[in-house]
């Protein structure tokens, strides 16, 4: 943290810049916290994307299973029809 202030030296005001050690430490801590928060947000976004992809894959698998079941049912019906038709 940079502090600018007017300093009275021998009855003359001078603009002085001073950087306190505490200010530097606070800035570094704030930057580290911001970086950690950004990393956490990125990780959460990646996890959400992975979950969405998994859900989509599961839905696709369920649809494929349903299609296979319908195909099997249709084959079964066709088999029954073939067996019943000749009689």
Image: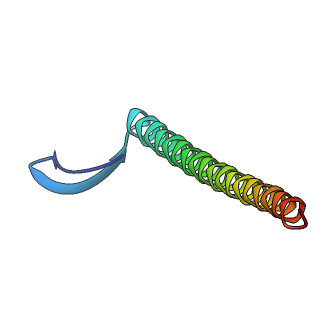
Q: Is residue 1 left or right of residue 57?
A: left
52 or 80: nearer the eye? 80
17 or 1: nearer the eye? 1
Vertical placement of 60 versus 38: above or below?
A: below
Residue found at the far front of this picture: 87
31 or 63: nearer the eye? 63
Q: Position of residue 76 (x, y in %)?
A: 82, 55
Image quadrant in which you'd find residue 84: bottom right
Q: Position of residue 29 (x, y in %)?
A: 47, 36
Colour mode of the rendering: rainbow
The residue positioned 77% from the left and 62% from the top of the image is 74
87 or 51: nearer the eye? 87
Vertical placement of 60 versus 23: above or below?
A: below
Q: Position of residue 51 (x, y in %)?
A: 62, 47
The residue positioned 53% from the left and 46% from the top of the image is 35
Q: Is residue 15 left or right of residue 27?
A: left
The residue positioned 84% from the left and 67% from the top of the image is 85
Vertical placement of 48 versus 83: above or below?
A: above
Which quadrant: the C terminus?
Answer: bottom right
Q: Is residue 32 left or right of residue 21?
A: right
Image quadrant in which you'd find residue 70: bottom right
Q: Is residue 87 left or right of residue 70?
A: right
Residue found at the far left of this picture: 11
Label tally: 0
């Amino acid at each position: 943290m940079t502090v600018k202030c007017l300093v009275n030296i021998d009855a003359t005001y001078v603009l002085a810049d001073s950087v306190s050690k505490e200010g530097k430490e606070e800035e570094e801590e704030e930057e580290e916290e911001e970086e950690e928060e950004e990393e956490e947000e990125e990780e959460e976004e990646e996890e959400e994307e992975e979950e969405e992809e998994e859900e989509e894959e599961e839905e696709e698998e369920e649809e494929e299973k349903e299609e296979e079941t319908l195909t099997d049912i249709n084959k079964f019906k066709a088999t029954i029809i073939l067996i019943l038709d000749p009689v």
